[in-house]
Amino acid sequence: MMRLARWLLSLALVCGMQSVSALDSAEPTAALYGQHCAACHGTDRLGGMGPALLPESLERLRPSELDTVLRDGRAATQMPAFGTTLAAPELQALARWLRTAPAAAPQWGADTIRASHVVMHAPGTLPAHPVFSADPQNLFVVVEAGSHHMTVLDGDRLTPIHRFATRFALHGGPKFSRDGRYVYMASRDGWVSKYDLWNLAYVAEIRVGINTRNVAVSDDGRWVLAGNTLPRTLVLLRAGDLSLARVIEVKGRSGDDSRVSAVYDAAPRHSFIAALKDIAEVWEIPYADAAGKPLASLAPRAIVLDDVLDDFFFDQPYRHILGASRSGGGQVIDLDQGRKVAALALGGMPHLGSGITWERDGHAVMASPDLGQGRIPVIDMQDWHTVATIPTNGPGFFLRSHENSRYAWADAMMSPRRDTLQVIDKQSLQVAGSVTPSPGRTAAHVEFTRDGRYALVSLMERDGAIVVYDAATLREVKRIPMDKPIGKYNVFNKTTRSAGTSH
């Protein structure tokens, strides 16, 4: 193993030296990259031992954060601090250059995808029972963005079971197999990983793109679909071992291509849904017929829209999509009819992807946070009118509840009141209380235990925590230290498609 590690290190150093000569004739900043960065991040900036360094890969880093990483390095990683090696103007030039797209668009096709495929444990080779005593349906997986780890948490004892390293910049929405045994993760730089929660072991990995939005897992357990922004593709994988089944170029009827905003599993429809960022279409990709019989073609069905909708909410039967447009307002799309059936008077910047539903006065209602204003619109799911608009502390990102809870929890993480969550009575639509886990520090993303008894809140800081509250009394029960926990996901709530959380 040590010989292999030394060989890989030598190879990386050789690649780094080759990149210097290849880039010497380019601008000085490119030569700096070749000398100091290419060994780990690739001569083409597509990643190697380190993540890809392209504008799409860095879009979630503020300029000041990128400057800090270049100057001070990253703790608990092999990213060195260049503040003592490069002058400040060189660091600034390098940061600007990294945010500039390469002259030639990077490629990541089927052959490259297949070459990245690794199987650690073939299907059927690991025991078909958990190696721990906790309820496997009441597990949480916690994404710790600070050190790129994931923690498996016992939802009954509220204690960690296991912690393991993940790929860099994991997307905050992992997906589970229907039985809850496997969790599928996507990193921002294209890696899709399958992890066996019962055996606490990685099963397989494959790199599907250069910049990936998320993954969806088919309800029949056969397929995983990944959506990319770079390249502009959908990648279909076999769920058993993550082997490549198909690469689908995302081109609209006009011939224009598009980035993928997100992919979803519409389980009652036996199909995937793809939200597209650049063209006014929604794609549905059936993987089974109405009787659940597998389909071989998996051909996309394009639904043409009035406007681009790249933030979706589905009703519980997955017949209707509620989508927000960038120009304001929104649309209701009937997937059976393949057309718009209603307009939504939303206003602001509603984040429908974080919407939830519940029953009120004999009607199903949907509520979602607003990214631009301190408000939560509540919509009647029968006739699509706005029932009420709840004022909040400020713009927020998440809204969560549970079937066994009378409350919905809303953050204001995009405002000065980012440290406080408000608790809303789902029947009166009034703010009933609030919690501030740690004054001045960002608190957001609530997930409930399987029975809805406890609400788990993320304190999204490097020395953060999962803060556990009694969901009825709002009393703090426990704190579990975590490294910037950006999200936590309960197996039962996700696999049963709880109306109080996103999917």
Image (spheres, helix red, strand yellow):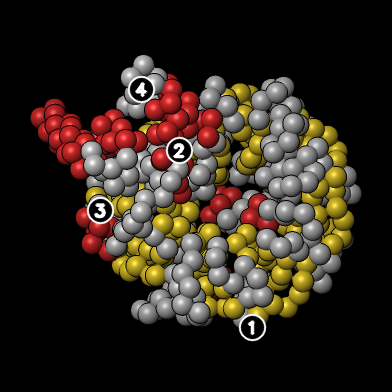
CA separation, marks 4 and 3? 37 Å
CA separation, marks 2 and 3? 33 Å
Give yes or no for contact between labels 2 and 3 (Cβ–Cβ under 8 Å).
Answer: no
The residue carrying mark 1 is 337
Q: Residues within 10 Å of mark 2 (few under 14, many from 20)?
A: some
What is the three-letter code of the residue carrying label 3?
Answer: His
Q: Nearer the viewer, residue 211 or 396?
A: 211
Above/below status of 197 relative to 112: above
What is the three-letter code of the residue carrying label 2?
Answer: Arg
Q: Earlier in the sequence, mark 1 or mark 3?
A: 3
Horizontal arrangement in the rendering, residue 391 relative to residue 192 (left or right): right
The residue carrying mark 4 is 86
| Residue 435 in sight in this render | yes
- Percent from the top left, x then y, of residue 95? 44, 35
User: What's the mark number on residue 96?
Assistant: 2
Q: Earlier in the sequence, mark 4 or mark 2?
A: 4
Q: Residues within 10 Å of mark 1 (few under 14, many from 20)?
A: few
Instruction: Please tell me whether mark 4 or mark 3 is closer to you in this view.
Output: 4
Element marked by disc 2: helix
- Percent from the top left, x then y, of residue 430? 88, 44
Q: Nearer the viewer, residue 16 or 143?
A: 16
What is the three-letter code of the residue carrying label 1?
Answer: Gln
- Quadrant position of residue 244: bottom left
| Residue 195 in sight in this render | no
Above/below status of 389 relative to 489: below
CA separation, marks 1 and 2? 47 Å
Please tell me which residue is depicted at 82% across the width and 41% down the height of the picture: 392
The residue carrying mark 3 is 117
Q: Residues within 10 Å of mark 3 (few under 14, many from 20)?
A: some
